[in-house]
Image (cartoon, helix red, strand yellow):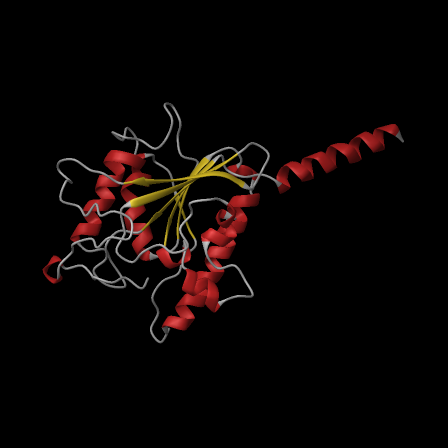
Amino acid sequence: MLARFILAAALATASMAIAVAAPARIIILRHGEKADEWKLCETGQQRAKALAANYLGRGAAKSLFASGEEPGFFFAITLHTLELASPAVASWNKPLILYSVVPETGLDQDGLTKQLNQRTQEAARNILANPALDGKTVVMVWEHHHIANAELEAKFPDQPVTLRQLLKLDILPGVPATWPDDNFDYFWIVEYDANSNVPARFSMVKQEFGAPFAALPANDWGAPNGLEAGSGCELKSPN
């Protein structure tokens, strides 16, 4: 009888541990500047290389990872986010976990949005409850409306659809309600205390690059990025 009680208690403890499993940190960023619905423009491609060399890749000059730390997992959702993450992920010889949403013939914007809603929800649930991620640093390269967008959240009042909602970032001070269309140059860094899937701290870090990437847009939050029509990049990015 005692042995059964001890076993039951151990199983209950294990279940609780799994239920509150969460990464130590989640680094969130948007995809790079894009040419069209399929690929990044030259500026976005350069940003992908710059991020690997300066912040997210192995041996990065201003690494967002602690000395001796490796990122646990990289997550992406669209072709643009996959393209941005690829140079950094490859430098670690790691796979990239893709909750894929891709352009389809006949798929309108409403249908695309609903797919992005569902895949964002699935990714957030996995990240906050998967014991394989517990205590690790994970990187989410995401579609910016599904990071934070007040208009999108208001359109779906009966369900959380952004990372701001799903990761409970809205309980923290200083978390913007919307990620601006013109900003491709920031990280959101979310920290969790041990044995908790409720975020404890939030910070924003601006991407700043020297040569050979000094020409990349580095506009302040909410400010225009200065891209012109001749850049080959879409000037407004709905996805």
Outermost residue toward the left in this view: 230
Position of 228 relative to 91 (above/below) = below
What is the x, y in percent for residue 227?
16, 56
Outermost residue toward the bottom in this view: 106
> How many labels sit on residues?
0
Position of 139 relative to 150 (above/below) = above
From the viewer's perspective, is 214 left or right of 87?
left
Among the 4 quarters of the image, the one containing residue 195 = top right
Q: Is residue 40 visible?
A: yes
Which residue does the image show at 27% across and 50% down from the upper left? 184
- Which quadrant is the N terminus positioned in? top right
Which residue does the image show at 56% across and 31% down from the upper left? 194
Position of 152 relative to 191 (above/below) = below
What is the x, y in percent for residue 197?
56, 41
Pick the residue in front: 220 or 213.
220
What is the x, y in percent for residue 136?
47, 34
Which residue does the image show at 62% across and 39% down from the upper left? 18
What is the x, y in percent for residue 106?
35, 76
- Which quadrant is the C terminus positioned in? bottom left
Q: Is residue 143 visible?
A: no
